[in-house]
Amino acid sequence: MGGPGEPPEGTPEGTPEGAPVGGEDEYRSVVFDESFVRAARLQEYSAQERMSDHTHAVRRRPARHRHFSKQAVILVLLIAVAFGTAIYMGVRHPYQTPAAQRPEPLRMTVIPLAPPGPVPGAEKPAELYAHSPAAQFRVGASGINLPAAHRTSHFSDGQVMTALTTAKDYLVESSLDPDVLTGGAVRSARVLLDPQQLDQFDRSFAHPAADGRHAPTGWLVRFDPTKTALATPGIRVHGTLHVTETDKNTIEVTSDHTFVYALRPAGQGEHTKASLFTVRRELQFRFDRDDLRMRQAELLVSYMQAGPLACSADAANQLRPLLAGQKAKAGGPAGTDPYATGDATALCGSLSATAQPSL
């Protein structure tokens, strides 16, 4: 007979004395403490609960909500703030170019130049050009020469070249385009302007005024198509372009060009005598980095001398040149030469005799 706790057959042979016997004793080392029991998903009903209507011996306990410690919450917030800061700094870093300033309104001056006598004329425009100061001028856009583009303190060679070419494009579109010159199209010049100047541009053409702000001839050269026609598309041009860095965010281009047009009366044939009309344009362009990227310009100053014109003529909206054989009723102060540098009177000047063909 085996003792208590021993199998009827006795202790198996080879089992050390005092060693646990049976499967039940194999789990004596496993401790089911209170935390283990509380964490169990299944819970046995008590005897009293089983005597009621419950049909199952166990029930499923609801999952316990885990609560993050304050340290974990703070760590997550710090990571989120650091990540957001990294994204913000990548989009707007401290060295980013500040927002561009609103462009100033264009300031414009148009000076009519009255001839001292009858306007010279000839049937062939080439003859007029040959006997004028424009004899050695180049034709069309080739007369607007670009200087060498050198980097500045804050702008690269490419950015300087972009400013120069944009200024040249504006001069070509506003001074040489036949559709613009005949008083029709304006879009080719308009698209080259900074968008914030377009309101002033549009008001100038909708409501022209000689107020130094809203004269269409301050933006471009255009003739009255009912009075004047181009005798030849070969317009003579000569002048210079100069670029300057004004600050770390802007550069300026100053242009000074003389344009010489051969004109005839509108609606008459080629046998009608042609005459020359001279326009001296000095423009000041400004470019910020957005302008350079979009290839647009802010036009700050437009100064134009034009003749032969009558001093009484309204030169704000359209130019109405005096043509071959015509003369002004009364001239202004003498000595204004659109081919030479110098100041002109604020209202009207007298076209120098040396500025006209010597036929």
Image (cartoon, rainbow, N blue to C red):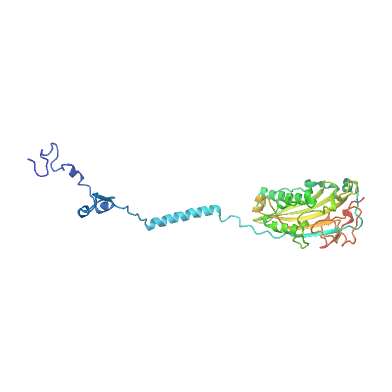
Q: Is the N terminus in the top left, top right, bottom left or bottom right quadrant?
A: top left
Q: Position of residue 199 (x, y in %)?
A: 70, 58
Q: Position of residue 129 (x, y in %)?
A: 87, 48
**Count the marks: how many?**
0
Q: Name the residue nearer the viewer: 267 or 172.
A: 267
In-image side of 37 versus 212 (left or right): left
Return the residue found at the far top.
Answer: 13
Whether residue 22 is situated above or below residue 245 in the rendered picture: above
In-image side of 136 versus 31 (left or right): right
Can residue 153 be seen from the camera position used here?
no
Residue 314 falls in image quadrant: bottom right
Q: Name the residue nearer the viewer: 52 or 140.
A: 52
Q: Position of residue 197 (x, y in %)?
A: 69, 57
Q: Name the residue nearer the viewer: 43 or 107.
A: 43
Residue in view at x 37 percent, y 57 percent:
69
Q: Name the residue nearer the viewer: 288 or 44.
A: 44
Residue in view at x 38 percent, y 58 percent:
70
Q: Position of residue 161 (x, y in %)?
A: 69, 48
Residue 303 falls in image quadrant: bottom right
